[in-house]
Image (tube, rainbow, N blue to C red):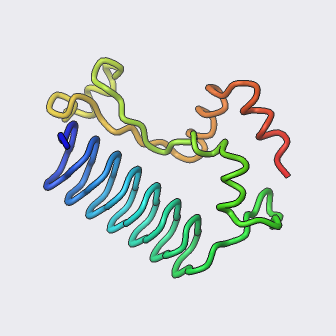
């Protein structure tokens, strides 16, 4: 596999920032998988550190879709402070709207503003930069880009 747009050392994959990453779109160190933010994650779409599994937020989770630390069993989905009678994984399988909410985006050089080029000088070497955004910013961006069907799925959540 070719390695493109990597910043750091010993990266395999695409658009990695950090060291010893295998996979794509990783920010942090020693990540294996795709779309990880943090350190020592194994799996996909983890935010935090030392997660094994997928879609974890927090630390040392070994199940999927966990928030917190040291979780080994799937958690119930909580929406608007109410626990649903389905796991987080079951919820995402049925309501995949959140898959498009991204906390990081790779911005290619040709799509960067002059201000972004001034504050991210490594774009000259990497061909772009990894834009980070808060969860609130990411939600606003998702809503502005969502079609009516996606918005309706959100508005009719259980």
Identify the residue at horizontal 67%, vertical 53% (top origin).
Answer: 92
**Left or right relative to 131: residue 143:** right
**Left or right relative to 80: residue 135:** left
- Where does residue 68 sit, x and y in percent of width and height? 57, 73
- Where does residue 116 sit, x and y in percent of width and height? 33, 27
Say above or below: 58 vs 35.
below
Q: How many marks?
A: 0
Identify the residue at horizontal 57%, vertical 39% (top origin).
Answer: 100
**Left or right relative to 70: residue 152:** right
Q: Quadrant of the N terminus?
A: top left
- Where does residue 71 sit, x and y in percent of width and height? 56, 79
Identify the residue at horizontal 35%, vertical 20% (top origin).
Answer: 111
Identify the residue at horizontal 20%, vertical 58% (top origin).
Answer: 19
- Where does residue 73 sit, x and y in percent of width and height? 61, 79
**Left or right relative to 24: residue 97:** right
Residue 84, picture quadrant: bottom right
């Amino acid at each position: 596999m070719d390695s493109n747009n990597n910043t750091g050392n010993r990266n395999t994959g695409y658009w990695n920032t950090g060291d010893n990453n295998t996979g794509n779109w990783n920010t942090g160190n020693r990540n294996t998988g795709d779309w990880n933010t943090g350190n020592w994650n194994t799996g996909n779409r983890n935010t935090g550190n030392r997660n094994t599994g997928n879609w974890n937020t927090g630390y040392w989770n070994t199940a999927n879709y966990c928030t917190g630390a040291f979780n080994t069993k799937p958690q119930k989905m909580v929406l608007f402070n109410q626990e649903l009678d389905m796991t987080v994984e079951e919820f995402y399988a049925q309501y995949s709207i959140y898959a498009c909410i991204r906390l990081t985006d790779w911005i290619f050089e040709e799509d960067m503003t002059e201000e972004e080029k001034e504050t991210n000088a490594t774009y000259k070497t990497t061909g772009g930069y990894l834009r980070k955004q808060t969860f609130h910013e990411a939600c606003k961006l998702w809503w502005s880009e969502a079609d009516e069907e996606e918005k309706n799925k959100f508005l009719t959540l259980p």
